[in-house]
Structures are given as C-alpha cells and as structure tokens.
Amino acid sequence: MTDLTETNPQIVDDRPTKPAIWRGLRCKCPNCGEGDMFARYLKVADTCPSCGEDLFHHRADDGPAYLTILIVAHIIGFAIHFVWSAYRPEPLVMATAFTVGSVALSLFLLPRMKGMIVAIQWSRRMHGFGKPAARDG
C-alpha cells in the first residue's frame, strides 16, 4: 500500500498520529495538546476549550475497557507471581492488596486509553473527524 504523500507531494500529513497519541494519553486535545479532552471522568468534551476542535465525533465504545483490562491483567499477573514466589504472604492479605491495586490501576488507565483511542480516530480522520473545515472562496 502506497502512502498518499509519496504519490502526491502536495498532500501533507497535518494530523500526525504519534503526537496525537501522546496527547491523548495525557488526556489533552489531540489537536493542540493544551485543552482537556474530558469534561468529566470519561465524558469527552464536545469541543476543545483551547483551540475549539470538535471532539464529539469519537466512537471509542469498548476499546478503552479492553485495553485497560489487557494492561492491568498483565501487570497484576506478573506482580502476583513475583510476590507469591518471593514472599508467600497470607492469601487474604495478598488478595486484598492486589484487588485494591487492580482497581486503582484500572481507574488511572481507563481515561488515558480512551484519550488515546479518540486521538487515533482524530489523527486518522475517522467517524466524522475527517470533514474538511469550511473554506472561503
């Protein structure tokens, strides 16, 4: 598959994916990186408060939850194995500690995963993000 910028040098990638992903992981607007992406914990703002970019087009659906579960399960799974092998704590203590850790890590990662998915959709012009701005003339 050829890149559009190779076949047509006039096309410029004005929405690079990598910076947008980093901005999304910081829960910032994928366009300017300044405004907060979220109006509440997981509610994406309709527009960026800094640059006015429309963000209501997103379709994150279940993707952030799946990514969060994938990451948390791997981290907690390796931690459980290490702690049990090295220290052999009481099962109830271990279960309580890892339950609290899992919930805390999930609550921390979930908005960041959603921000990343919205940023990828924005950079790839998916789900309405690709509508060109109205131009004069």
Image (cartoon, rainbow, N blue to C red):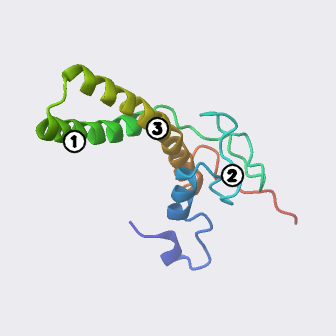
Q: Which residue is mark 1?
A: 78
Q: Quick one: label 3 or label 2, which is nearer the N terminus?
A: 3
Q: Helix, strand, or loop for circle 3?
A: helix
Quadrant including the C terminus: bottom right
Residue 102, horizontal then vertical, whole percent: 37, 32
Q: Amino acid at mark 3?
A: Pro
**71, 85: nearer the viewer:** 85
**74, 30: nearer the viewer:** 74
Q: Helix, strand, or loop for circle 1?
A: helix
Residue 90, horizontal then vertical, whole percent: 19, 24
Q: Quick one: label 1 or label 2, which is nearer the N terminus?
A: 1
At 64% across and 45% down in the image, what residue appears? Answer: 128
In-image side of 64 versus 53 (left or right) = left
Residue 75, horizontal then vertical, whole percent: 29, 42
Q: Amino acid at mark 2?
A: Lys
Instruction: Report the residue that reaches farthest toward the top.
Output: 92
At 42% across and 37% down in the image, what residue appears? Answer: 105
> Quick one: label 2, few (<14), some, or many (20+) residues within 10 Å?
few
Q: Are marks 3 and 2 in contact (CB under 8 Å)?
A: no
Q: Quick one: label 1 or label 3, which is nearer the N terminus?
A: 3
Q: Amino acid at mark 1?
A: Phe
Disc nearest the viewer among 1 and 3: 1
Task: Kindly identify which numbered label has been placed on residue 64.
Answer: 3
Q: Are marks 1 and 2 in contact (CB under 8 Å)?
A: no
Distance between mark 3 and mark 2 Cα atoms = 24 Å
Res. 16 image quadrant:
bottom right
